[in-house]
Image (spheres, rainbow, N blue to C red):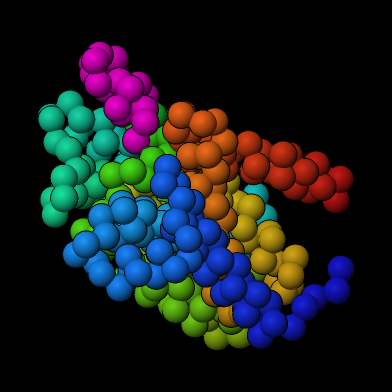
Amino acid sequence: MRRLPFWPVLLGAVLLCLGSILFAALIGERTLSVSAAWQELLRPSQSPIVWGVRLPRIIAAAFVGAALAVSGVGLQGLTGNSLADPYLVGVASGASVGVGLGVLLGIADTPGQPLLSLLALTCALLATLLVFALARSGRQLSLSGFLLAGIVVGAFLAAVVNLLLTLARQDQSRILQKLMGYLDDAGWQQLVVLAPVTLIGVVVLSLCGKGLDAMAFGEATARSVGVDVERFKLGVLALIALLTACAVAVSGVIGFVGLVVPHLARALLGPPHKPLIPVAALLGAALLVLADQLSRSALPGTLLPIGVITAILGAPFFAFLLRRQLAD
């Protein structure tokens, strides 16, 4: 397949992202015209629909999508595995435990106090530290060991989540709603951590592009071109874990974004990571904004979890990738 030039693809991704945000801002229970939306944007204190409800959710969806997408690009490049997904590192299960504990303790996200998200983020980072501890041997970090440790820790924490669901009883629906992908609680306060971490993550991973290109050919090749492999692996995996943890803490578990979007970006630009990462971030943002909107409008009167939408879209794509990899 012929690869496209970087700048036209980047411009197209920017327009797609902005268009999806505009579309989501206009469409809802009360559909706004462009002029009405513009008037509300100019009056933040007098526009509870746009500034108070829609924009926080839309911006949160965009940053969550971008964080998951670039995490997927980084993990796939680092491991050389095109089926690697950022949720494999145990972060999502750790955040899920935090949500379950928060609901049992009666903690809720309120305007100005996103306590449940902070608890989910803390548990996600603790789970990541456990995965790192299991995967390290002396000063070396095994990539295959890291993924296996992530799967083991994730399975254990999934059992803990099931236990919390059993104990929750009347609050089971609230826990499940948060875990299946839900952005209605997203507010400006939750973006204080998510937005800067995502922006920094995109920039840093882009700067690590040459190292990721070298790692795709194996650790020996990366060492031969001057990459400090152990430090590089540790730094990139820590950044991927932080990005994923921040995303899951805000939105719950939204699958397949970190798997599908890197392949879409790679199909347009080819394998070099430096141009790939910003385009993947924009495509991930657009995809999740549109998925969030679809979750609200697919069944009138019913709010579908965003994770259901992304799974319906992503599972066939994953099956296609798996069959193609087995055929190779």
Percent position of residue 40, x then y: 32, 65
Question: How far from the left and from the top, in percent, is residue 181?
Answer: 42, 40
Quarter in which the N terminus is drawn: bottom right
Magenta-colored stretch includes residue 84: no
Q: Position of residue 262 (x, y in %)?
A: 63, 61
Left or right: residue 262 versus residue 239 is right
Give x and y (percent) for residue 130: 31, 46
62 or 153: which is nearer to us?
62
Does 108 appear above or below 261?
above
Q: Residue at x 46, y 29 (%)?
A: 301
Note whether residue 48 is visible. yes
Query: Could you tell whether 159 is left or right of 86 in the image?
Result: left
Prevailing SS of the magenta stretch = helix
Of 176 and 88, the residue lying toward us:
176
**Residue at 25%, 69% in the rendered image:** 43
**237 to the left or right of 221:** left
Residue appearing at x 57%, y 36% in the figure: 298
Left/right of residue 56 with respect to residue 107 in the rendered view: right
Residue 232 or residue 254, whichever sits in front: 254
Magenta stretch: give its range.
159-178
